[in-house]
Image (cartoon, rainbow, N blue to C red):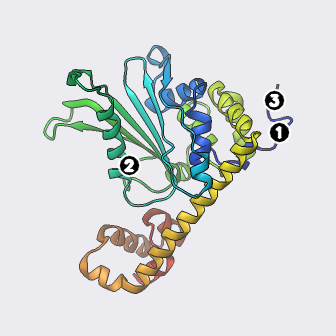
Amino acid sequence: MNIFSNHEPFHRFNPLNDYLFYKVMGEKGDEVQLLGFLNAVLGRTGKEQLKSVEILENKSFPKKIAAGKSCVLDVLAALQDGTRVNIEVQLGNERNMDRRSLFYMSKVYAESLDEGQNYRKLPNVIAINIVDFHFPQSGGLHTCFHLREDNDPSLALTALEIHFISMVKWRRLENKDILNDPLHRWLAWFDEKSSSELIEEVVNMDGAIAEAYRKLEEAMQDRDAYRTYWAERKFEHDLVSRLDGARDEGFEQGIVQGLEQGRDQGTIEIARKMKARGRPLKEIIEDTGLSPEAIEKL
């Protein structure tokens, strides 16, 4: 049966909206889709596939979101070996993603140990960050970091692992492998800009994504959840507008002084080189976060 036959196109709602992502992936009962996503991100296939996952928190923040307050709607789960996994979605670039993710990862790590327990009881922690901006500057759409010894990278402290998945880099990827790569299927599903035909294809290919689709529709049929979704989207748009406005004003008033003092010198140098190579203005803005006015002055 075609699950799209009696419904509007899925991509009408943004599954990377903080609230909706949590409703689809982070509540008790969402284990099927969460497990499918984790296997895709961690590259677990065949006998290495994760077989079970426990969702550790069951949050509810509709009143705070509806009031225009920011909430951390991350997804926290435990794997069968005790490893903690923290998943966060960040749509706006506040230029603190590395430190922000390390902070939340450290918080999960520290809070996993009860008072009086031995440090050996501390679990491994995996942080997964889905971002809708160009981060990190180098690397592909999916980057993964560990604590490694400088002179011998094969020597690693395995307690902490941090992933970044960039939706901007995903959209630019020329050779998307929807047929063979589970992560590519999930990113197509997450991408609000994907065509309804592509969404239908990946939903019908992947049982975990189909379950996520079912949960999304179920959530959007609830009046309170529907209102909360749009309230959170308004908060996201307002935040981005405020950040862009502050950034534009700052560059208009002080870009020359900023250049002299070396502020954001790396970003500015990247923008200057891209401009010299004739790269499109839209691409420079996406890669650097600079305003059109600032780029024109370079």
203 relative to 240 in the view: left or right: right
Q: Position of residue 28 (x, y in %)?
A: 57, 26
Q: Quadrant of the C terminus?
A: bottom left
Which label sits in the foreground, 3 or 2? 3
* Residue beneath disc 1: 7
Inspect the image, locate mark 3, and give the three-letter code of the amino acid beneath it.
Asn
At 36% from the left and 84% from the top, the residue drawn is: 254
At 66% from the left and 24% from the top, the residue drawn is: 207
Q: Position of residue 99 (x, y in %)?
A: 32, 51
Q: Against 67, is 84 above or below?
A: above
Q: In which quadrant of the rendered view does residue 145 lie?
A: top left
Q: Residues within 10 Å of mark 1 (few under 14, many from 20)?
A: few
Q: Is residue 181 visible?
A: no
Quick one: label 3 or label 2, which is nearer the N terminus? 3
Q: Is residue 21 visible?
A: yes
Q: CA distance from mark 3 to mark 2?
A: 38 Å
Quick one: label 2 or label 1, which is nearer the N terminus? 1
* Residue beneath disc 2: 139
Q: In which quadrant of the rendered view does residue 153 lie?
A: top left
Inspect the image, locate mark 1, and give the three-letter code of the amino acid beneath it.
His
Q: Position of residue 34 (x, y in %)?
A: 55, 29
At 53% from the left and 56% from the top, the residue drawn is: 69
* Residue beneath disc 3: 2
Contact flag, marks 1 and 3 (Cβ < 8 Å): no
